[in-house]
Image (cartoon, grey):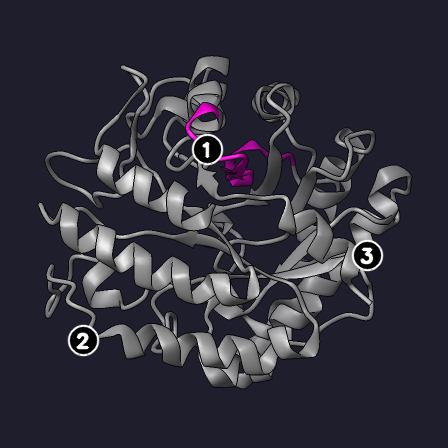
Amino acid sequence: DRSRVFDILSNINIGWNLGNTLDATGGGNSVNAETSWGNPKTTQEIVDTVNDRGFNAIRIPVTFANHLGPAPEYTISADWLARVKEVVDYAVNDGMYIILDTHHETNYWLKTDPNNEAALCEELAAIWKQLAEAFKDYDEKLMFEGMNEPRMAGSAKEWSGGTPAERKLINAMNKAFIDAVRATGGNNADRVLIICTYGHNSDEPTLKDLEIPSDPNIAVALHTYTPYFFTYVADGSYSVWNGSKKNDITWQYNNIKKYLIDKGIPVVITETGAQFKENTEDIVRWIGDYVGTLDQDGVKCFIWDNNIYHGNGEKFGLLNRSLLKWYNDDIVDAYVNHAA
């Protein structure tokens, strides 16, 4: 019975991702890595601005790879851990729900090679043991998400669910994450832990092969930028949303419903969003269809925000963090109001 997890998640209105910040990987092992991808240092005011707008939950993506000591301890550098804690505390001060995750590890040590299972599980467990100890006394509003889009970069099936052996490896790593956190006791004994599929993918084979641990305080995270060619800039992408592609959303949702929701397993979309293509009204209509579909079963969304709205790059920016002003009120209003 996972009713407690459903109760906790039901208190979330909509979530916001502090993207391209503590997950940024420039600047090596320096604490200044936070600003290496062009974002300002995170402040209490930034988090206040997000919370005041109706996002009562925040996901804090963090990359640890450059901030670790050697095996087998993989000690997280003290100043990096202190900074992560400081940012988490900004959200705690605002009474927000928080998801803390390990992020771009896939660019470094987390290659989903089934032959490397023991070493992968050992490093993931070592990182989470330290994080679990550091946050042991935090209440149930803090949730841990074990991995971000674990996959084999450059492989043929990198973004389409991996191989059966790779999917099996993800199950082992999810278990290593859960065991490491639970072993620390305290509030971690029943903290909500969020596991994922290969690449956070929600295709049928991927969902089918995901093992759900018997642990009652578990949720599953997926990333659904759906339909891809509307939400991303790529060959074949389009910017008009007239509802004709809504069945892409429905098809994906039916998979999630069949393999997770209908089995009583809580689901969180820890990343979604649509790149801005000078198409405000279309994105607003898409939000209605997308959030409206997920809302049928109370599935909560965390919107990706990398603070890029003009110029080059993936334009997922919502909040101009330097000015504490929202780039596009219509889009932000649509997210918050549809979720409410």
* Image x and y of residue 271, in percent: 43, 52
Magenta stretch holds residue 62:
yes
The tag earlier along the polypeptide, 3 or 2, is 3
Asked if the residue under mark 1 is in contact with the one under mark 2, i.e. CB atoms within 8 Å, the reply is no
Closer to the camera in the image, 200 or 331: 331
Q: Which residue is mark 2?
A: 244
Dot 3: element: helix
The tag earlier along the polypeptide, 2 or 1, is 1
Give, as a three-letter code, the residue at label 2: Ser
The residue depicted at 18 percent of the width and 42 percent of the height is 313
Dot 2: element: loop
In which quadrant of the rendered view does residue 100 lie? Answer: top right
Reply above or below: 324 against 133.
above
In which quadrant of the rendered view does residue 242 lie? Answer: bottom left
Reply above or below: 29 against 74.
above
Asked if the residue under mark 2 is in contact with the one under mark 3, i.e. CB atoms within 8 Å, the reply is no
Instruction: State the mark number for residue 54.
Output: 1
Q: Which residue is mark 3?
A: 179
Give, as a three-letter code, the residue at label 1: Gly
Give, as a three-letter code, the residue at label 3: Asp
* Image x and y of residue 11, in percent: 63, 44
The tag earlier along the polypeptide, 1 or 3, is 1
Closer to the camera in the image, 119 or 59: 59
Which stretch is magenta? 52-69
